[in-house]
Amino acid sequence: MSRDQAYGGIILVVGLIVAVVYVVAFFAPYFAPYLAWLSWWAVAIPVFLAVLAVLVICMWIGWTMLTTPPPAPLETEVPTATPTETVEKPPEAEKSTSQL
């Protein structure tokens, strides 16, 4: 078994234990009324952690925006006329002006 597989197994076991403890704590008032306070904590702790995670992400985004230098402004290029884009006079117009 590789080290990555061992870490995966540890994560699986810890996740399973936390899930079982959470379900038992959430439904504790139905099993043992003297453990009703446990159900409140089973809701309060995940809500607290979720709100804290969202706030940390917001702080990280703000810190990144604050410390990142602004991008260099884009310079618009003025299109220059290429020889194929220039308007040439038709040959008849040149003949008529040269005869005057």
Image: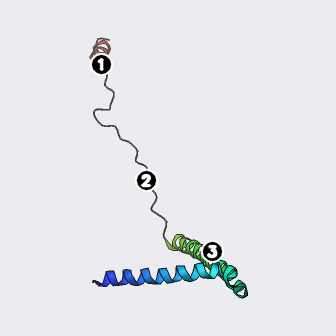
**Image quarter in which the C terminus is found:** top left
Q: Is residue 14 left or right of residue 99?
A: right
Residue at x 28% of width, y 32% of height: 84
Q: Circle 3 is placed at which residue position?
A: 51
Query: Image quadrant of residue 20?
Result: bottom right
- Secondary structure of the residue carrying tag 1 is loop
Q: Earlier in the sequence, mark 2 or mark 3?
A: 3
Which residue is rendered at x = 29% and y = 14% of the image? 92
Q: Using the numbered discs, state the Cα–Cα distance from disc 1 to disc 3 in whole angstroms.
A: 74 Å
Other residues around mark 2 within 10 Å, as few (<14) / some (14–19) / many (≥20):
few
Taking the image as shown, residue 40 lies to the left or right of residue 77, namely: right
Query: What's under tag 1, amino acid-wise?
Result: Pro
Q: Nearer the viewer, mark 2 or mark 1?
A: 2
Query: Which one is in front in this view, the residue at disc 1 or the one at disc 3?
Result: 3
Q: Amino acid at mark 2?
A: Glu
Contact? badges 2 and 3 (CB < 8 Å): no
* Element assignment for label 2: loop
Residue 97 position, x and y percent, is 32, 15
Name the kind of residue labelled 3 in the image.
Answer: Val
Residue at coordinates 63% horizontally, 74% vertically from top-left? 51
Q: CA distance from mark 2 to mark 3?
A: 43 Å
Q: Nearer the viewer, mark 2 or mark 3?
A: 3
Q: Secondary structure beneath disc 3? A: helix
In front of the other: 17 or 28: 28
User: Where is mark 2, residue-wise?
Assistant: 75
Residue 1 or 4: which is nearer the viewer? 1
User: How many residues crowd around disc 3 within 10 Å: few (fewer than 14), some, or many (20 or more)?
Assistant: few
Q: CA distance from mark 2 to mark 1?
A: 37 Å
Q: Quadrant of residue 4?
A: bottom left
**Between 77 and 53, which is closer to the camera in this rendering?**
53
